[in-house]
Amino acid sequence: MSLLVVGLSHRSAPVSVLERVALNADAQIKLLQDTVAAEPAAEAAVLATCNRIELYADVDKFHAGVAELSTLLAQHSGVGLEELTPYLYVHYEDRAVHHLFSVACGLDSMVVGEGQILGQIKDSLAKAQDLHTAGRLLNDLFQQALRVGKRAHSETGIDRAGQSLVTFGLEQLAAGASGGEVAEWAHGKKALVIGAGSMSSLAAATLVRAGVAEVVIANRTAERADRLAEILNDGASSDSGDGDVVARAVPMDAVSGELTRADVVVSCTGATGLVLTGEAVSGAVRGRVPVAGAEAEGVARPGAVGVPPAPTRAAQAARLPAGSAEDDSCPLELNTPGFSVLGEAAVAGMAAAELEQHAAWVDNAPRPQGTGSVVDEAEAIAALAAAAAAGGRIPERRRPEPLAAGPEPVLFLLDLAMPRDIDAAAHRIAGVRLVDIESLAEASADAPMAADVDQVRRIVADEVAAFGAALRAAHITPTVVALRTMAAEVVAMEMARLEGRLPGLDDKQRGEITQTVKRVVDKLLHAPTVRVKQLAAEPGGAGYADALRTLFDLDQETVAAVSRAEHSNTDEEDRGPA
């Protein structure tokens, strides 16, 4: 049997595809059960995070395994196999081990070096153990991956290279304000956190440390929201002693009201649909309470009561005379700070990779014959989507020019969910800054790499070699055990025959002869068995087990029985805590 992983991540697929492939807890359970029920797979585990979905399996046939795992991912995600295949990657044997170890160390994360992936790997292993889909191979693999990840974080400065996705997201929200410092940007703001899971809890705690004045927790399970609010209040009181931060829990149906009061919203739930629609965000901006003192200074927030939102670029272009310089404008709305082409792609219903540069539209926009008029925005986006579908990726002509400064954001949104919690249309609402998984993927592509990354890569390479050697050595162990068992049976048969020929032997003589024969057999087998284990542990050493079975005419079923017995004896041990 051999290790195989089939999956997709932010490195192989646009977030719009990852969002569609995302599996909830029940779907993951069904996927695991169906995988081990399939013919090529004996074990299975699913690693599902906000930016990856991977299916690990122990298979006996490579090509059949790839086909089966790919088909199962497509079936359970609801994305057609033909559509999904271009985004899938496949790793086999040592490459699969190297991939998981790299993931565990944070080398393959959207934010290099982040440590949350270790908890997600541990959860993945626990789920497979509970469902009894993880056997000896995957138990050993995932537990070793956890140890490798911990080693990387303890022996290197990889933690300095990266941060949690939460911290990185908040830094992206703060970018351009207060010098980009989260503490200065967040100080005194009111925060709304939707969800009470690990990611949401980390976001709430981070905001409290950054100095927000209030944190409101909304969650479908009231007890979890209450508990998180209690922890935050206790922590704030013990840290500051003045209890300035107030944390409180509210039911989910109170979110729309809290949205009009919040300055910062972080959402990370397991919902399969949108938690905040574009209309809800737009309504919250229009209904916001003005900032204290804003009227005295003659300043009102964009979108506040009585203050119309800034006109969109498309609306401005529609009022221009035909043939003016603005006629060839991109029909997408570009005036909002933090404009995201990826967000617009989601709004238009196309893959992000198909709309990488809005300038491509400026150069290639289909326009009515004989006119220079601006095409209706909805028709223009539909035409662009059709062009992308027909010709694949739109060719990049030139990089877009920097956008003119727009209104300062008054509502900051951080969406860490997959699939998304917040409508991508919020990218287009004046006065709103939305950072989502797509935005983070775009920003992290240019993030600097720490010098410690090279050291972590060396650790991964060493650990992969050690794991592979141990795995290959373990593979030949049942054959060696079967050989020694056969030798012991030969000794027993020969001693029984000797008893018939020399019935006058006393117990002492019989014992001496037996021990002598055993020592001879052990000495003859010692060097070959030790050497064959060493050779089998080296790359390409898998054939030594077959050679040993052939040379000594060992029964394959006997070897398999030894392997099953070893597996049974270690099963409970393997299911222990990581």
Image: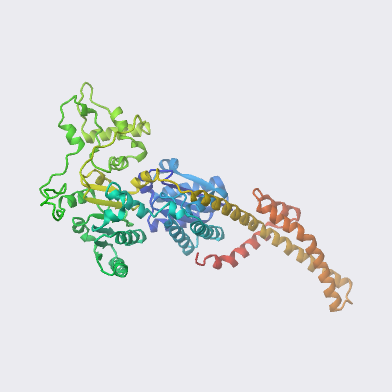
Residue at point 46%, 63% (across, down): 126
Up/down of 372 relative to 97, above or below:
above
Up/down of 409 relative to 213, above or below:
above
Q: Which of 257 and 350 is in front in this view?
A: 257
User: How many numbered markers are drawn?
Assistant: 0
Residue 570 place in picture, x, y as percent: 58, 66
Please state if 468 lies on the left or on the right of 21 as rendered. Answer: right
Instruction: Examine the image and state in which quarter residue 205 appears.
Output: bottom left
Please state if 174 lies on the left or on the right of 99 as rendered. Answer: left
Instruction: Examine the image and state in which quarter residue 204 appears.
Output: bottom left
Up/down of 366 relative to 89, above or below:
above
Residue 559 place in picture, x, y as percent: 67, 59
> Is residue 78 in sight in this rendering?
no
Q: Which of 547 and 576 is in front in this view?
A: 576
Up/down of 280 relative to 335, above or below:
below
Q: How is this picture coloured?
A: rainbow
Q: Nearer the viewer, residue 161 or 48?
A: 161
Please state if 109 lies on the left or on the right of 351 as rendered. Answer: right
Q: Nearer the viewer, residue 458 or 121?
A: 458
Residue at the farthest top position:
370
Residue 230 place in picture, x, y as percent: 29, 69
